[in-house]
Image: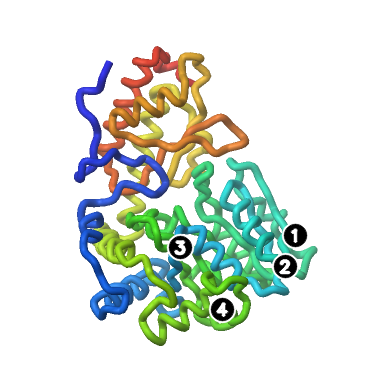
Amino acid sequence: MASASIARSETGDPLLLTPGPLTTSKAVKEAMVHDWGSRDAAFIAINRAVLEGLPKIIHGEAEFVTVPMQGSGTFAVEAMLTTFVPRSGKVLVLVNGAYGLRAKKILDVAGRANVVHETAEDTPPDLAEIEQILAADPAVTHVFAVHCETTSGIRNPVEAIAALVARLGRRLLIDAMSAFGALPLDSREVAFDAVAASSNKCIQGVPGLGFVLARKTALEETKGNATTLVLDLHDQHQAISKTGQYRFTPPIHVIVAFHEALKEFLAEGGVAGRGERYADNARILIDGMRALGFETLLPEARQAPIIVTFHMPKDPAFVFQRFYDALKDRGYVIYPGKLTVADSFRIGCIGDLHAKDMKAFVGVVAEVLKDMGVGLKSAA
């Protein structure tokens, strides 16, 4: 049976229940319909406002600077790792998903020594094992952690990790790609040298700009570390500080849209306001899907309100591609699974989505399951 209506954003696009790119506001989209000169004073002022505003989100405006990096979030992570880890350094990579594994691959390609502490995708790092590794290997200079692993949606305990790393005299680098702007990260209480994020996640901009919030004193020590010209954060920071301009062509429309997204972020109440809306979205989604018989991968204590992983139903009538296509036909785009521990799919809670959207989505899922002949209460 066809849905009575098809879900659409305020600009007529399908709703993206994904971890980014995500549904953006009309104002963010409209910011991109103008052309700007990269060396024009108006654009330089917009870019400066973006760079100066981001450290405030981690309460780090006195100690941190923003170093932007053209490209996706992975560009920023690779820039962070290959700039902050010297050629003689060694990294302990905490892995419980695809993005920890990607960091290891970056380090391998860059020729940086590394060791891995890996747990299952539904399991946070083991602090006792981390301590043992660091105590046994004084060559380890840095630890890399992912704040929210979107492979599963798990929230990793970066605060506890940071305390341990600091106590043992090492330096922490954080991938906060899917967490920045929604999960608190207070640089006054959590010790780290740098955190990487991007424009198209919880700030709700569009893809194309990564950035690293770098502790000033740590960044000053990184000259000569970088393995590539383009991804050299020290050189990028020096150029922008002196001229207000990027070394190479910036993603102008992305930055202008990000500026608008930051204004909306602050108007919503910053991390507290946005995090509360996402948490409400996640609660509605999880409660609604469980009522239909779905099971979540993660327990509540480990679940970040960013993206939720659900086990595939065991009912033979459930075919994921049919499920996905039927939801897309009704205006909702979800995310396939990426786990090795379970056959699963994922649904995002972030972007310009609100309680009414999540409630409507759950209703459409019930409708699709009925059309597929999947028993609602026995879906899992």
Q: Which residue is mark 2?
A: 140
Q: Quarter-wise, where is residue 218 in the image?
A: bottom right
Q: Position of residue 2 (x, y in %)?
A: 26, 19
Mark in the foreground, 3 or 2: 2
Q: Which residue is mark 1?
A: 133
Q: Which residue is mark 4?
A: 218
Mark positioned earlier in the residue sequence (3 or 2)? 2
Q: On the rendered structure, is 43 left or right of 144?
A: left
What label sits on residue 185 in the rendered view? 3
Mark positioned earlier in the residue sequence (4 or 1)? 1
Q: Quarter-wise, where is residue 137 in the image?
A: bottom right
User: What's the residue type where badge 2 is placed?
Assistant: Val
User: What's the residue type where badge 4 is placed?
Assistant: Ala
Mark in the foreground, 4 or 3: 4
Q: Quarter-wise, where is residue 48 in the image?
A: bottom left
Q: Residue at x 76, y 65 (%)?
A: 135
Question: Cα distance, mark 4 to mark 3?
Answer: 18 Å
- Residue 257 higher or lower than 316, as above or below: below
Question: Cα distance, mark 1 to mark 2?
Answer: 9 Å
Q: Position of residue 213 (x, y in %)?
A: 46, 70
